Image (spheres, grey):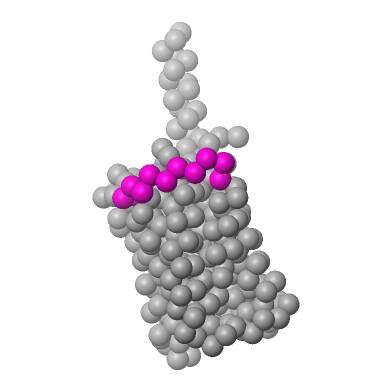
């Protein structure tokens, strides 16, 4: 299996795990800051247990990726509590817009034509979501989700800049920072209600939704471009509201469903075209090499 294909599969697994976040967060009747702190504490322990030989260089790339990730998690949990799960996740995924705008400067990675086309479709889908959320009175939550998209883009870019190293350490540092900040703030908040459902959901967030996803993401981002990774990750919005609907009955609006379908279709088509393009380039290179040898 080609290196890029492995990266795409790992990114799909990442998106699947991430998509469980909306459901698990809705199942926990705690303050959003407490949820973020508990989730990150569990995830940090899980990731540390999987790292054989951690390499903490505390380089600019490692630190920026960690801090951006910490902000993303705190902002997303807040947004999830102040708007619908579908709106929170899709508006956060304005990240590909920012990644595409900055990737040429930060990484020297230029977008492919199909990726630009996907970006246009994603903007259209997000527009449908945003128009609905304004009517529903979710403006504060939606704005928070947009800001989370900006910090998420910074995380992806600086994780990709560690493609010659091990980006997993940035995730550990990001979770550790989030846990310290959030759990400290939680001291001044009402004590969380401890019951079996909340505790199980928090462990699901820490181990499955964030911990396992982090391992898959760290594997993927060194094998595919930042633009491709951010686009593939948008498979998550197709699944996030589905889990919430099946378990809790939270139904997205008609416009939200259409917007989600547009976004997912654009990502799938872009990924297929990118893989096909890479395969053709490889075949042409092999053919040229054979002719040169002959």
Q: Which residue is drawn at 45% across and 42% down?
A: 55
Q: Which of 90 and 174 is in front in this view?
A: 174
The overriding secondary structure of the stretch rendered in magenta is: loop
Q: Identify which residue is drawn at 38% across, 79% down.
A: 143
The single residue placed furthest to the right in the displayed view is 196
- From this view, report whether residue 142 is shown above or below residue 272: below
Check the image and name the residue furthest to the left.
Answer: 105
Q: In this view, does 136 lie above or below 211?
A: below
What residue lies at 43% left-to-right and 71% top-to-bottom?
Answer: 181
60 in the magenta segment: yes
Image coordinates of residue 148 in percent, x first then y, are 41, 70
Depth order, front residue of 187/81: 187
Looking at the image, residue 63 sits to the left or right of residue 11; the answer is: left
Residue at 43% x, 63% y is 177
Residue 15 position, x and y percent, is 57, 59
* Position above or below: 192 against 15: below
Which one is nearer the viewer's eye here, 209 or 92? 209
Q: Which of 22 and 263 is in front in this view?
A: 22
Look at the image and give the residue range highlighted in magenta. Answer: 51-61
């Amino acid at each position: 299996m080609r290196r890029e294909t492995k990266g795409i599969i790992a990114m799909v697994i990442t998106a699947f795990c991430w998509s469980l976040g909306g459901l698990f967060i809705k199942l926990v009747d705690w303050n959003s800051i407490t949820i973020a702190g508990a989730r990150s504490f569990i995830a940090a322990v899980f990731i540390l247990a999987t790292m054989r030989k951690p390499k903490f260089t505390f380089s600019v790339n490692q630190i920026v990726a960690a801090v951006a990730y910490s902000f993303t998690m705190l902002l997303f949990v807040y947004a999830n509590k102040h708007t619908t799960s579908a709106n929170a996740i899709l508006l956060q995924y304005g990240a590909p817009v920012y990644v595409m705008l900055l990737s040429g400067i930060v990484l020297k990675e230029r977008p492919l034509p199909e990726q630009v086309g996907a970006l246009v479709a994603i903007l259209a889908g997000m527009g449908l979501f945003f128009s609905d959320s304004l009517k529903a009175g979710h403006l504060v939550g939606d704005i928070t989700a947009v800001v989370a998209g900006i910090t998420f883009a910074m995380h992806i870019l600086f994780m990709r800049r560690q493609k010659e190293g091990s980006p997993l350490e940035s995730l550990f540092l990001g979770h550790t920072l989030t846990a310290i900040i959030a759990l400290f703030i939680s001291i001044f908040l009402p004590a969380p209600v401890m019951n079996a459902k909340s505790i199980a959901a928090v462990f699901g967030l820490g181990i499955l939704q964030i911990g396992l996803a982090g391992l898959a993401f760290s594997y993927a981002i060194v094998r595919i471009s930042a633009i491709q990774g951010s686009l593939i990750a948008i498979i998550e919005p197709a699944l996030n509201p589905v889990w919430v609907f099946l378990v809790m009955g939270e139904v997205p609006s008609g416009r939200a469903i259409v917007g989600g379908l547009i976004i997912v279709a654009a990502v799938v088509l872009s990924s297929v075209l990118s893989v096909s393009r890479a395969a053709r380039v490889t075949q042409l290179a092999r053919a040229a090499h054979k002719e040169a040898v002959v």
